[in-house]
Amino acid sequence: MRVDIKGETIFRYLSKDIPEYPTPVEFHITEVAHINEADIRAAEERFLEKLLTKEEKTAHPPFLSEFTTSPLFLNKTSRYGNFRFTFPLAELMEAYKKQKCEDQEPVLRIYETKLFSQEIEYVILVHNPEFNEKFRDFPLLKSSPLVAYDGHQIIWKSQAICETHNFQLVTCGKTAMPEPLNSHEWYVWDQVSIVFHTKDVLTIPKRKMKASLSCCELDPKEQHSESTMSLHKEREDEDAALKFDSPTPQPSCDQPMTSDTR
């Protein structure tokens, strides 16, 4: 459960003594909402570039997956339900550009940073240039030291990839390896979310919606009384609803439409 924290509690979280771990780790996010093993491996290579030559990096054994323990990287489960839609970020931005920006380039801004009991969320706002005056108090994304957008992917320098620290990072010469801890430590983890400002629907073809749909298990921390059988029945119902190739409008709202990396 996500619970906002403030004041002295924030200080206790951020001043906690945590064993060494890889930070920052640079991820190049091309899909919403998804970070897969290939993304982790690519981020690991970028991290090792600071320590090793190209030849040494190629021979270095994998290690980063021991630290990517936050819910962001657990693709078999979700905190938000049993179905996940995964869209290429460039396609989503192009759809927003054509439908909501009169084919002008969308504007990206730093919307807010939210701190929960064990999570830091960096929120990016995407909006039509028509609303520059309305959102002028929100800094442009290019001023952020942690998140950037290069036209087809989000470049994110994650500061905290672990939910539970079972290992510490030991760097010896030109080797970076995970060393098991005698007892685990927990700390905040971070993620990036994207909100699309819209007052009406964003339309996506049903065929594409169906191709983007996958079934996943509900995070055990969020489960209540649902059974596996009912989950698969719901998936069948979703498939049936998406069998026709016609546009599917997304729900209309006066608040930003959200999407994230989870």
Image: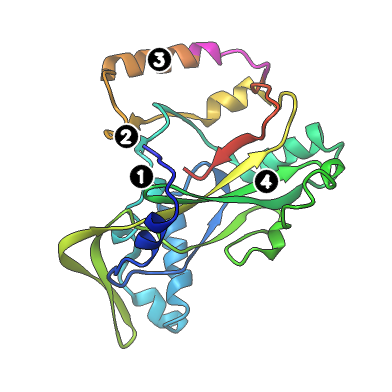
Q: Are marks 2 and 1 in contact (CB under 8 Å)?
A: yes
Instruction: Identify the residue position indicated by label 2 in the image.
Output: 219
Dot 4, crowdedness within 10 Å: few (<14), some or many (≥20)?
many
- Identify the residue shown where x is 73% and y is 57%: 140
Instruction: Identify the residue position indicated by label 3 in the image.
Output: 234
SS for tag 3? helix
Where on the picture, by quarter, is residue 89? Answer: top right
On screen, residue 18 versus residue 2, left or right, reads left
- The CA span between labels 2 and 3 is 17 Å
The answer to which of 120 and 154 lies nearer the viewer is: 120
Earlier along the polypeptide chain: callout 1 or callout 3?
Answer: 1
Identified by mark 3, the residue type is Glu
Q: For marks 2 and 1, give the one nearer the viewer.
A: 2
Instruction: Identify the residue position indicated by label 1 in the image.
Output: 74
Q: For marks 4 and 3, give the one nearer the viewer.
A: 4
Q: Are marks 2 and 4 in contact (CB under 8 Å)?
A: no
Q: For marks 2 and 4, give the one nearer the viewer.
A: 4
Q: Percent from the top left, x then y, of residue 48?
A: 42, 75
- 244 within the magenta span: yes
- The CA span between labels 4 and 3 is 32 Å
